[in-house]
Amino acid sequence: MSRHLSILFLLALILSACSNTKYLPKNEKLYIGAKVNILDKNMPKKDAKALKAELEELPRPKPNASILGLRVKLYLYNISKGKKNFVSRFINKRGEPPVLWSSVDEDHNSKVLTNHLQNESYFRAQVTPDSIIKKQRAMAVYNILAGPSFKIKRVVFPTDSDSLDTAVAGISKQSFLKPGDKYNLDVIKNERIRIDAKLKEEGFYYFSPDDILVQIDSTNAGPNMVNLYETVKYETPDKAWDIYTMDKTYIYPRYSLKDTSAKLDSALHYNDYYVIDPRKTIHPYVFQNVIALHPGEPYNRTDHSQALSRFIDIGPYKYVKNKFEISDKDTLKLNAFYYLTPYPKKSLRFETVLRTTSANYNGTQVNISWRNRNAFKGAELLTVTLMGSTDIQFGGNSAGNNVYQVGVQTSLTWPRFITPMRVNTNNGFLPRTRLQLEYDLTNRVNLYTLNSFSASWAYLWKQDIHIQHELTAFGFNYVNAANVTKLYQDSIIHTRNPSLKHVIDNQLTFGPSYSYTYTNTMENYKQNTYYFNGKVGLSGNILGLVTGADTLHGKAKAIFGTNYAQYVKLESEMRFYHKISANSTWANRLIVGAGLTYGNSTIMPYSQQFFVGGSNSLRGFRARSIGPGSYFPDASITHGTGFIPDESGDIKIEATTEFRPKLFSIVYGAIFLDAGNVWLLNNNNTQPGGQPGGAFSKNFLKDMAVDAGLGLRFDLTVLVLRTDLGFPLRKPWLDKKWVFDEVSLRNSIFNLAIGYPF
């Protein structure tokens, strides 16, 4: 480690010694940036700091980029300039030429800064340019005397009685311009956009933001105050004063640039729209939940935008082009035209995924997917996916027990609800109905083979941009173990680990589930963002009650020779992100889950149980190696390693907090702390020795495993490559639970993964 640091230090020293200024043309200086000084002593320090940071982004040109004070790109350009060989040309393209002091126009930059200050209420601002020159380096300095900030005293809206003036005055309560606020030109521009958006909702199709004039009066407002007068411009076109209603809507489902004729004579009338589709590529009923603008209703932008969004959301269409024209029979009515350009109907996709886990598995997965975007002319998406994967373990206790998996998944998705009655939605997102069938075969070499069959019928819909629902009306899953070797059976007896036996138990689950998701994490401008997912799943509940299933009293019930699972499963995940600065974030996650078995079950099916540990969980422990509770296998079972794979539980609590600063360029850092465990609802004594300490109790906090660590993230745009080094801090199965020492550091776990852990 120290050797690597020495090399890095030496490299930095060499680069810094190789001065870029010696490559400058004669009598030139290297421009190293601009500095802004706020001279107003009465300005609050917080305002001055924010204004300084804002203004320092405006001067042009920008200086050469630097990393830790080193202008690496400039250095690469200098050492390769003028050389003809391939290596030099390659290096030169990745460098950047010097930004010279002679290219800086301080007077122009002063005018830009003055204009910006005046736009932000500092009408009397003065900017004085200066410079600092040391040898062959030059810095521009702009001394700012901002003066007083002007505030809004009064906002006056139109008072005339015509429809347009009345409409503008009627939406004044939502105005962005408030008495007491600082004058700001950007706010005025946004106010004009707000008025336009509101008027578009009321049928003023031809109105535009440029038709609003905001006049400023500082003579009658008092010291450092202004009055604002909002008016409709006198030269506003006549069409902008009228309210327009909808007439006819025409849809072209197979449009291309070659189409030049309207073909209105071939339009097929369906409901209150017309479809021009001579080749009959899609059923007209597909668009009944898409069109939101109906004949006789005033035009409004919300329904207009909703229709555009839904045309894309249907699935088969790549582009949508739209226009409105005044109707021939009524000058106050609009005809709408939608031109849809489809994707290729059928496509084949090949995908390869490489992965590494903290359990020393290195894997490759290959997916081949065939898609038909309009399978039965109803915009149905038919997908057939073939999957194959290998996971090979290097080292560890299961070296050689490689895992191979093959599977096929078929899904059919409709862009609407398939229900006995018609269900309408009124937002920009189309609901979906999905039928899915899947078969997977998992072969763990020398141990066992698992056959998994599943089927589901689900409804998916978005309530708005933040909220999403998924209701699986019926889900079915059957797992059958085959080819269980004597080696694996002997390991069950030797380790006395019930989890190993539970892996090869036949499993049958069926029932509904519901998932609710809320997120605003896409709103990057917010300082605090949230994510929440809650899910409830049921299996065998009604059948178990009807048949009187009761395993504890010898009344276990089976279907086709397999006892079906009866449980209620509750899961929740909460995330909180706090933006500390533009380049650093504090991220937090809490996961709580519980599987409550009764009637025909005493323990959750293995496929429905919870696990902790690994690259997306507790990163200081190997995957699925923690728990349940404080249970710890005897050294004679694990040969002194303390590790048994696939430890699972019916209850899970996991929490993570992580600081994510940007280090430089595409490299981000991480400092994290993880805690969590899994527990059994009831202690498992189905095997000799059971799992003492594995059951959930009121002292569950004493069973929490804890780790900490450091990480790097490389944002490569198309993906994020993540490395984490985690080391255990607390092992709940030890008498001395806190274990932060040299041994803990030696037992650290290196995780390599794609994407953030959450």
Image (cartoon, helix red, strand yellow):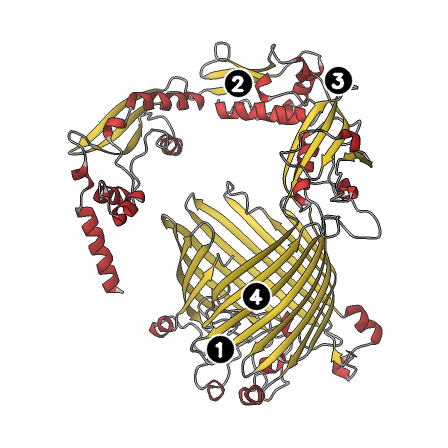
* Pointer 3 or 2: first along the chain: 2
Residue at screen point 54% across, 43% down: 523
User: N-terminal of the two: label 1 or label 4?
Assistant: 4
| Residue closer to the observer: 455 or 741 | 455
Residue for point 51% across, 50% down: 577
Q: Along the horizontal axis of the image, is 623 left or right of 236?
A: left
Q: Is residue 57 above or below residue 86?
A: above
Residue 59 shown left or right of residue 7 in the figure: right
Specify whether 309 is left or right of 731. right
Asked whether the residues under the numbered discs 3 and 2 touch, taking CB atoms below 8 Å apart as contact, a structural biologist would say no
Q: Is residue 74 above or below residue 156?
A: below
Q: Earlier in the sequence, mark 4 or mark 2?
A: 2
* Residue 653: mark in rendering: 4
Q: How far, Cα to Cα, is label 4 from label 2?
A: 55 Å
Reading the image, the residue beneath label 2 is: 153
Q: For the residue marked with disc 1, what is the amino acid?
A: Trp
Task: Kindly identify the residue that appears in the image at 37 percent across and 32 percent down.
Answer: 57
Q: Which mark is residue 331?
A: 3
Quarter of image, res 413? bottom right
Q: What residue type is labelled 4?
A: Ile
